[in-house]
Amino acid sequence: MRLLTHNMLSCNIKGVTNGFPLKLEADKWVTKEVDLNADFLRGVFPKIEWPALVAAARALDYGDLPEQADGSMLTSEDFLRRFHHALLELHVEEGALVCPETGRRFPISKGIPNMLLHEDEV
């Protein structure tokens, strides 16, 4: 699971009002090289919840993202490379996503998050 995916997932348990961002607990992660596409990064940047991305990257021991970011930073090659690495090259293979409100754990296995709800959660 890429951090791009993590940034778009939330807990959808019935009654949950604060289901984003999910806390990332990673047991195993890898780096997979991907060609940098600056136009894609500039296009997706407004959709990214920056504090959630920074927290997820730090859960993977990647601390090279600034605490805050704005669109003016997208002209920096260095910023784009760091953003690209965090968003697209870090892959969580095993671990869990944890709902911030309920503590419900959603497992990540072989890079795939299982967000299926139990019958009583729907």
Image (cartoon, rainbow, N blue to C red):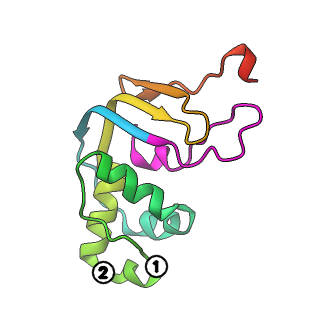
Residue occupying image coordinates x 24% and y 54%: 62
SS assignment at label 2: loop
Q: Residue at x 62, y 37 (%)?
A: 11
Figure check: 94 above or below 67: above
Q: Nearer the viewer, mark 1 or mark 2?
A: 1
* Residue tagged 1: 70
Q: Measuring 33% from the left and 60% from the top, which residue is drawn there?
A: 84
Q: From what the image shows, is residue 61 above or below residue 67?
A: above
Which secondary structure, mark 1?
loop
Which amino acid type is shown beneath numbered disc 1?
Asp
Determine which quarter of the picture holds residue 76: bottom left
The quadrant of the picture occupied by the C terminus is: top right
Residue that lies at the very extreme toward the top in this rendered image: 119
Q: In the image, which residues are magenta?
A: 1-23
Q: Is residue 115 left or right of residue 58?
A: right
* Callout 2 crowding tier (Cα within 10 Å): few <14, some 14–19, many ≥20: few
Figure quadrant of the N terminus: top left
Q: Which residue corresponds to the image point at 56% horizontal and 37% vertical from the top-left?
A: 99
- Prevailing secondary structure class for the magenta stretch in the rendered image: loop
Q: Quadrant of residue 103?
A: top right
The answer to whether 121 is drawn above or below residue 15 in the figure is: above
Q: What kind of residue is marked 2?
A: Ser
Q: Nearer the viewer, residue 118 or 87?
A: 118
* Front residue of this view, candidates 28 and 38: 28
Q: Which residue is mark 2?
A: 76
Question: Is there a contact, CB below 8 Å, between mark 1 and mark 2?
Answer: no
Where residue 50 appears, as percent x and y from the top left, is 47, 64
The answer to which quarter of the image holds residue 14 is top right
From the top left corner, tell me how far across and down residue 69 is, in percent. Answer: 42, 75
Q: Is residue 71 above or below residue 47?
A: below
